Amino acid sequence: MYLLYLVCGLLISSCAWAREEDVLEFGDSDFDAKIAEHETALVMFYAPWCGHCKRLKPEYAKAAEDLIRNDPPVALVKVDCTEAGKDTCSKNSVSGYPTLKIFRNGEYSQDYNGPREAAGIVKYMKAQVGPASRELKSIADFEKFLAQAKESVVVGFFEKESDLKAAFLQLANKLREKVQFAHSSFKDILNKQGLTDGVVLFRSAQLKNKFEPESVSYSGTAETADLNDFVTKNFHGLAGLRKSDNQRDFKNPLVVVYYDVDYVKNPKGTNYWRNRVLKVAKEFEGKITFAVAATSEFTHELNEFGIEFAHTDKPRVAARDADDKKYVLREEFSVDNLQNFASELLEGSLEPYIKSEPIPEAQEGSVIVAVAKNFEDVVINNDKDTLIEFYAPWCGHCKKLAPAYDELAEKLKDEEVAIVKIDATANDVSAPFDVRGFPTLYWAPKNAKNKPVKYDGGREVDDFIKYIAKEATNELKGWDRDGNPKTTKTEL
């Protein structure tokens, strides 16, 4: 019995060890020779101290375990740019960490622009090897292809060459990183499907349900664009599985139902809730996009809706309308409550959720503090040219800017110009303002608040004054258009 435990323990230990070892590590001494041994390889150029690299490492290792067993295999490689791989990183123009690049037969092919989580890496890299559409040569091939699908797949049935087949193969190449394609001219497969020149989208076994057909046949023209529209429209079905690597596929108005989605450990429980979502989604087909999503994968998004992450038996629901305004279902999840929520979303009778700090009771200093709830009054409807700083409290560059920004506001306090700041981490930022880093500054002329201009000038007081003097709707009282003082002020 002890020997059995020992053998099992060694096997488990070996499996865990092999998972890490599936990621190959090359350096300057062997990179060129080793990378040439692999038909397709994904290389991560990293620095050990890099936080993003540390977060990617376990996902990368998990993906490597799958991809090394792919047919054909894909090698996942890492190169330490701070030690053994300095020259290799320099030669490959690595300027930030992590940088991921795809190599084919030892030669650089392209930058990797795919997801940074294991499932997404696997899907993206599998699409990089082999033909864009897999040829099915037997009934067994066909059935295995459908059985292994984790999401919708598209299959072409072609007795001979045709315009539809040409369009199909062209689309397969275009969408190879997003969708799995297969085709066949095998007689038994064509007879089984009853097609000689057609295309069918098949839903994966785990997503089949009674509210929509298991497959959808294409009936459009032999044009790639029309075929693409067909795949896009039907790929996710009535309530698709929304993940971090496909979330952009789901267009507004959008209702997302968050819960413990897990088709590996709990497919029955996952479909229990999804079927209830599907029942409602069927009633709003073509009017609202519905999706289900794993709570654990979208905790940040839930926080943006004011929904705190918590393990619960009942799903949570959030939505965005056509104007990207946010809404939250406050009642407990049920089919009736979801149905009413969707109806009111379409009617426009729901009250939007706005993430906002409280409106300041009083404004202290010359810089006006805005929050989401008073942004319209403070910025949009203030009848003044406005400079807005979107900042983060923890941002070092924002802290460095603060004294100059305060001084600027004090100098311009008697002008028809508002100097405003808003904490973009604690307040919603709506279009047309696009904030992707801190600080971000926008100039919003009083007669064109819907077309603000991103400020990319200097960060000293004189830089700001010259810019504002030039761009102000009405000439400033204290400065000419070139930013020169109109009068000399003597300080006592």
Image (cartoon, rainbow, N blue to C red):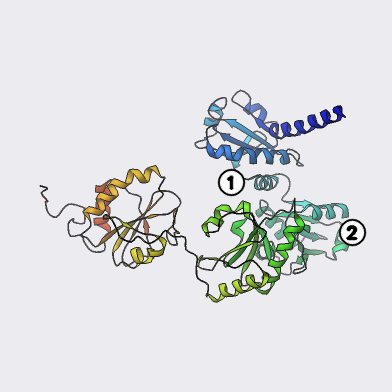
- The number of numbered discs placed on residues in the rendered structure image is 2
Q: Nearer the viewer, residue 122 or 288?
A: 288
The x, y position of residue 348, in whole percent, is 52, 74
Q: Badge 1 local density, few (<14 within 10 Å), some, or many (20+)?
A: few
Amino acid carrying mark 1 in the image? Asn
Q: In screen coordinates, is 62 left or right of 457?
A: right
Q: Is residue 254 visible in the rendered structure shown here? A: yes
Residue occupying image coordinates x 36% and y 59%? 370
Judged from the image, the secondary structure of the residue bearing numbered disc 2 is helix
Q: Quadrant of the N terminus?
A: top right
The x, y position of residue 115, in whole percent, is 61, 47
First in sequence: mark 2 vs mark 1: 1
Amino acid carrying mark 2 in the image? Asp
The vertical placement of 1 against 314, above or below, is above
Q: Mark 2 and mark 1: span between their CA atoms?
A: 40 Å
Q: In screen coordinates, is 120 left or right of 433?
A: right
Name the image quarter holding residue 226: bottom right
Q: In screen coordinates, is 406 left or right of 209?
A: left
The x, y position of residue 450, in whole percent, is 39, 65
Residue occupying image coordinates x 77% and y 59%? 156
Q: Are marks 2 and 1 in contact (CB under 8 Å)?
A: no
Q: Which residue is mark 1?
A: 113
Name the image quarter holding residue 196: bottom right
Name the image quarter holding residue 312: bottom right
The vertical placement of 211 against 386, above or below, is below
Residue occupying image coordinates x 57% and y 74%? 344
Q: Which residue is mark 2?
A: 188
Q: Nearer the viewer, residue 45 or 62?
A: 62
Q: Nearer the viewer, residue 318 or 182?
A: 318
